[in-house]
Image: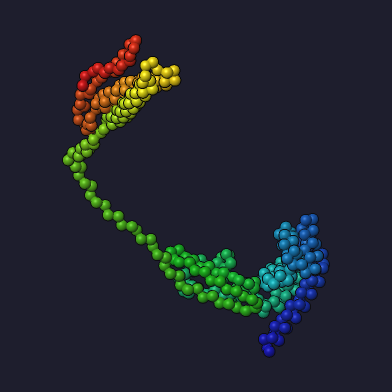
Amino acid sequence: MTSAAFSMTAAKRVACGALVLASFLALPSVARADGAAKAHADSLFREGRTLLDAKRYDEACPKLAESQKEDPGAGTLLALALCHEGQGKTATAWNELVEAAALGARVGRNDLASAAQKRAKAMEPLLARVVVRVPHAEDTAADYDVKCDGEPLEAKLWGTPVAVDPGEHRVDVSAKGKVARSYVVRLAGAGTVEIVIDKLEDARSPVAAVVKLEPARAASTTPAPLAPVVEQSRGGAQRAIGLTLIGAGVVGLGAGAYFGGKALSESAEGRRACTTTPCSAASKADADDANGRAKTSMTTSIVSVAAGTGVLALGTVIYMMAPSSTTRGAAPSTRMTARIVPAVGPTEASVGVTGAF
């Protein structure tokens, strides 16, 4: 009950203080305590005040902050503190109130300074605080680097409550040759959270890789082994052509034999067609037809045999002329040479082969 009553009393004091400060902000002279109003800064201040009165804090705070940046003044800083308080940033608002009190006293506005001081004191019970304790601080002050929300935390503030806005906060600790640590805390409202920094461990030094160097081996005087003797076929393609021609010649001879047999059969057919003398006209016609076919077959047979014989002979010669297999590095064998000599006459054609074998 005592804690609840205290909180209610503090809240009432804060509310009353806010009304008092709002009355100060209503005076133009206070809004620009230094008297050096600038047109743009004034415009921003008026827009920010209008938004602040409407409790549109998220829109009002940036305008008031920009106005304070362009034309610093205790009145503008008070308005900005009220705006941040409306956003729930109690620590930010408290720090601005303390600064506004100092600025008011510096420019001779003791009434403004007194109001800001009273409001700041009324807000103190509502602040959230973080205490960062560093073990052996006297030994590590020169080595440890402590940051709170990315901002350096001076060694003189270690172990001292530091006001922070409600929400999540991160404390990072690092040191040369040490393993860095991070701590995250979350504060929902008034209260104090203590963070005890553990002693940082030494960082592991990189292990150097050991490379064993062997003494250089003496150059060998042993001659390199000769390349293996590889058998190389130099007449394979030529022998294949010879075999192809030999095969074609055999086919030609076979065709000649076939048509020769057919000619003999057709000649016998002609003799059988005319067995009497004189032959009848019909028998004579059949005999003439059979004899004509026999002559054609015989001619085809003769041509086929001649061609087959020539091609067979040519294929045999080409096959025999193909060089035998040799080995790389061996002296080439004596090659056979030949010439193909065609002979054409009035009634026949032939192919001759001359050369050295």
For image coordinates 76% across by 58% down, the residue present is 41
Figure colour scheme:
rainbow
Q: Position of residue 62 (x, y in %)?
A: 72, 62
Residue 153, compared with residue 66, is above or below; it is below
Residue 106 left/right relative to 160: right
Q: Quadrant of residue 318?
A: top left
For image coordinates 21% across by 36% down, the residue present is 229
Q: Position of residue 285 (x, y in %)?
A: 43, 19
For image coordinates 34% across by 12% down, the residue present is 347
Residue 56 left/right relative to 127: right
For image coordinates 67% across by 69% down, the residue present is 92
Residue at the extreme left of the image, as rendered: 222
Residue at the extreme right of the image, as rendered: 27
Q: Position of residue 51 (x, y in %)?
A: 79, 65
Q: Position of residue 158 (x, y in %)?
A: 54, 72
Between 78 and 178, the one lying in front of the other is 178
Q: Quadrant of residue 86?
A: bottom right
Q: Quadrant of residue 280?
A: top left
Residue 349 left/right relative to 24: left
Residue 102 in view in this figure = no
Residue 148, compared with residue 283, is above or below; it is below
Residue at the extreme front of the image, as rendered: 277
Between 143 and 117, the one lying in front of the other is 143
Residue 108 left/right relative to 236: right
